[in-house]
Amino acid sequence: MASIETSIATLKDTGYLKIDTPNIDYVAEIKRLKEEKNAVLLAHYYQIDEIQELADFVGDSLALAQRAAKTDADMIVFAGVHFMAETAKILNPNKKVVLPDLLAGCSLADSCPPKEFSEFKKQHPNHKVVTYINCSAEIKALSDIVCTSSNARKIIDSFAEDQPIIFAPDRNLGAYLNKVTGRDMLLWDGSCIVHEAFSMEKLIDLFQEHPDAELIAHPESEAHMLKVAKYIGSTSGLLNHVKNSDKKKFIVATEAGILFEMLQENPDKIIIPAPAKEDNTCACSECAYMKMNSLKKLYLCLKYELPNIEVDKDLAKKAIVPINRMLELSK
Ligand code: 13P
Ligand code: SF4
């Protein structure tokens, strides 16, 4: 069995603690450790069902940031991806924030490297910078305000109509926002691998089988998907739409983890995940990063309080300004 010392030494390479855990009842142990350590477990809707079930709070990116900002727990266990845990740490510099797998990143955040973005920003000195929360602390520190897909429109509308804006990193969300706000924001060319994986060809086949279904989509999806979607919204927006709609059948274009909550809230409705181009197994889109977190990793992370998220103090001081501006505007 690997010792904790060996595991900590290899944490940098593996991203999480590699320790054998024979005969552990993860669910019982996670509940016990949460209680013992006064830890709060925050989970995104894209997490595996078992983690969503155990979480103290499940939400979209905005609700999770809002929860993290006001928690009185001693430790935040973030079942999500790195930028989410990093945001929680920036909001709680004196609390321990842990992420079950340090390698749970985000293709969208990775598509915006700070050095290149800083150069881009310098080329457009009269522009304000609005960044989607799916980015690193370094990018947040270069921003005027952060947004999520729940509040992006409101945040953009808060600027004067003639104010030039750079929007980063998601080009699909940015193009959608340009369309709905009538602006001409400069877009960074980043994207999410999951939301760009939907197959229009397979979707047409699916509609032939289910002509009575309504397509709903996350705004990180490509323009051709958004064009045919009847509703476009963040994960919480999609959940609210399905709950409040009279329709009985939906095709959902976002990460498939959302189906867990959607089916729980709507046991009488038929929810079909939008098909992905390459997937012939589950026929849905899954975020490999979000799915890196497992019950075992969650248990180990609560037990050893590792891997913990650290953010350089000076960087955190800069990054918290645009995050707080967003939280203020989202009350
Ligand atoms: P929301 O939950 O804010 O809609 O974000 C979706 C997402 O891609 C998170 O990575
Ligand atoms: Fe990033 Fe896309 Fe995964 Fe969300 S679904 S964490 S945007 S890669």
Image (cartoon, rainbow, N blue to C red):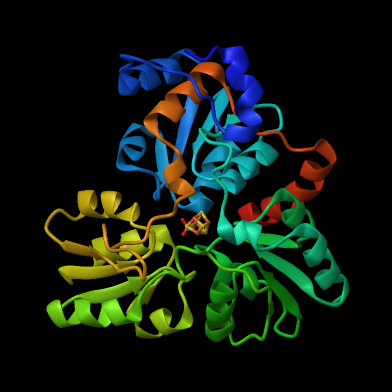
Residue 59 x %, y %: 43, 48
Decide if residue 138 is in sight here: yes
Decide if residue 211 is in sight here: no
Picture quadrant where residue 3 is located: top right
In this rendering, the count of numbered labels is 0
Q: Is residue 17 above or below residue 43?
A: above
- From the image, which quarter does the C terminus lie in? bottom right
Residue 116 x %, y %: 80, 65
- Position of 1 with respect to 13 (left or right) is left
Look at 64% across and 66% down and name the residue there.
169
Which is more toward the observer, 6 or 210?
Answer: 6
Q: Residue furthest front?
A: 1
Which is more toward the observer, 23 or 99?
Answer: 23
Look at 51% across and 33% down and name the residue there.
100
Look at 37% across and 21% down and name the residue there.
31
Picture quadrant where residue 217 is located: bottom left
Residue 264 x %, y %: 21, 48
Which is more toward the observer, 161 or 229?
Answer: 229
Look at 31% across and 62% down and name the residue there.
284
Picture quadrant where residue 255 is located: bottom left
Q: Is residue 51 above or below residue 306?
A: below
Q: Is residue 256 above or below residue 88?
A: below
Which is more toward the observer, 171 or 294?
Answer: 294
- Position of 34 with respect to 7 (left or right) is left
Residue 318 x %, y %: 81, 49
